Amino acid sequence: MLARVRSAAVLGIDAYLVDVETDIANGLPTFATVGLPHGAVKEGRERVYSAIANTGYTFPLKRITVNLAPADVRKEGSAFDLPIAVGILAATEQIGVERLGQVVVLGELGLEGAIRPVRGALPVALAARAAGAEALVLPKENLAEAGVVSGLKVLGASGLAELADFLDGKLELPVADVDLSSLFAERAREEVDFAEVKGQAHAKRALEVAAAGSHNLLMVGPPGSGKTMLARRLPTILPHMSLEEALETTKIHSVAGVLALGESLVARRPFRAPHHTISDAGLIGGGSYPRPGEVSLAHGGVLFLDELPEFRKNVLEVLRQPLEDGTVTIARASMSLTYPARFMLAAAMNPCPCGWFGDPQHTCSCGSQGVLRYLARVSGPLLDRIDLHLEVPTVAYQALAERGVGEPSDAIRERVDRARLVQRERFAKRPGVYANAHMAPRDIRSFCRVSDAADALLRTAISRLGLSARGYHRVLKIARTVADLDGQPELEPKHVSEAIQYRSLDRRGIG
C-alpha cells in the first residue's frame, strides 16, 4: 500500500514542502530511502524501526521504499524521522489517514518513540502557511517558535503514540497560542543601558553618530578603557526591530540551531562577538551543507570583533562581501546559498602590542615601528569599509567615582530614530540604501551639500592632515549624519569638524 505524508525541509533560511511517499510491497525485508537523502536522513531508518516497535505498533517485514520528493534536492537533518514513521503506519493501515492530508509533519524520533526538537521550525511554519496547509504538527519544544506564524494551526506532539492517536481522532494535540504583540514588547526589553557607562562622553557621542547613520566603527584604546562595554550597548540605541526584521532574524537563528528551546522570537538587535580564533567558515558560514555564520547571525544588529589585529588575515578579508553587499553567498559544487548579512561592524583594538601607546599613565615599550606594524595588521581594504575611527582613552578616576547615572539608551535612541527617519525619506527612491553609510559617490554629490565655510575647512583638512580620497568621502558621510542629528539640511563647519575627529587613523597616515 502507498501512503503520502507532507513534511518540509530547509534550504538556506527558507523552507519548502517535501512529499514523503511510503510504499510497502511484498518481498525480501528491505528499507530504502531515495530522493537524495544525506547523513541523518539515512540513519533515520534505524530510529524509525526502534520507535515503531517500542511504541507498540508493528514494523512490517516487507520491502519498504520511502521517496522524498522533490527528488533532485538534497535532504539534510533528522526532521524526516516522524513523517517516515507516520507514513509506514499509514501504509500498513495501523492508523487512520483522514486527517493526514490536512497536516504537515516533522520531528526527530528517539528510540523509545519520543519526538525531539528540530531546527528551522519557523521557516517551516511560514512555508506551510504559504502552501495552504491547515495545520503543522511538530515537537512540543518547537511549539512557541512556530506559533508566532498567524493563519496556521500549529500543534505540538511529544511522542509517536500521541500523534497516532491524534490522527485516529482519539485526542486533540495542544495548539500554540501566542500573543505576538505582547511577546514582541516583552522580548524587546534591553538588559544593558548606556546609563551604566561612566565618563567617555566623546565615545558615547561617536556611537550615537554611528547608530544614526549605520556607520561601521573601530575603537582604539588601551586595555580597560571600556571599548567592549560601549560596544555591548550599541544595539540598545539602534532603532527597534520591526516584526518583519524580527521574523527574518529568528529564521536565521533557528536554521543555525542557536535559538534557545522555548524562545519564539528574536526581538532585540543581535549582538555577536566571536573570539579572534574563529575560522573563516565560522565567521562567514559554510560547511559541506552550508550553515549561517556569525555575519548572518548578526543580521540586523551588531558584529563586534574585539582585538581586531589578532584575527587571522584570511578571516578578516572574507568580511568584504557582506560589508559591501549586505549578503553572503556560499558556493559549493552541489549548491549555492545566499544568506542575509546586513549588520553594523563594531571593532576594537589596542593602539600597540603592549596596549599603552599614547597613555599618560603608562610607558609604551613597542616603539614607533612596532606600533605601525601592529596597526598594519588590519588591511587597507577593510579599513576602507569602516567609517569611524574612535580613540577611547582610559577613564579618569573622577568619572568612575561619580554616583550619578549617564544618559539612558532610550533618550539616545529617540535622536537616532529621528535621524533615521530623515534618511529613509531621503533615500526613498534608492532601493537598497536606507542610511547614510550606504551612500554611493553619486548620492554623496546629491545629498552632501556643504556651505562655503565647511568647504574651506575640508580643503584645509585634506592638505594639512593628508586625508585620502576615500577619507574625504567618509568625512562627508559622517558629516551628513551629524547634520541629520542636528536637524540641518546643509553641512556646516561644526558638522565637518566633528566628522574629521572620527578619522584618527587617517591622521596617523594609516589606511
Image (cartoon, helix red, strand yellow):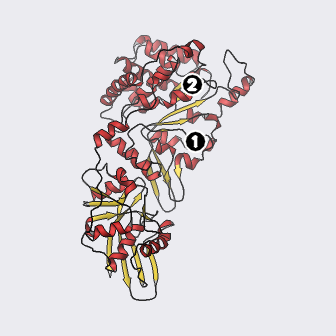
User: 230 left or right of 374?
Assistant: left
Please say if 418 is above or below 58.
above
* Rendered position, 290 above or below 342: below
Find residue 422 and report its image quarter: top left
Residue at 61% of width from left, 19% of height from top? 394
Q: Residue at left 42%, top 85%?
A: 62
Judging by the rendered image, the residue that carries numbered circle 2 is 226
Measured from the top left, where is residue 488 in percent x and y?
Answer: 35, 17
Res. 70 in view: no
Q: Amino acid at mark 2?
A: Gly
Residue extending furthest bottom? 27
Q: Secondary structure at mark 2?
A: loop
Mark 1 secondary-structure assignment: helix
Left or right: 192 in relation to 350: left
Amino acid beneath label 1: Glu
**Label of residue 317 in the image:** 1
Q: Front-most of 328 and 9?
A: 9
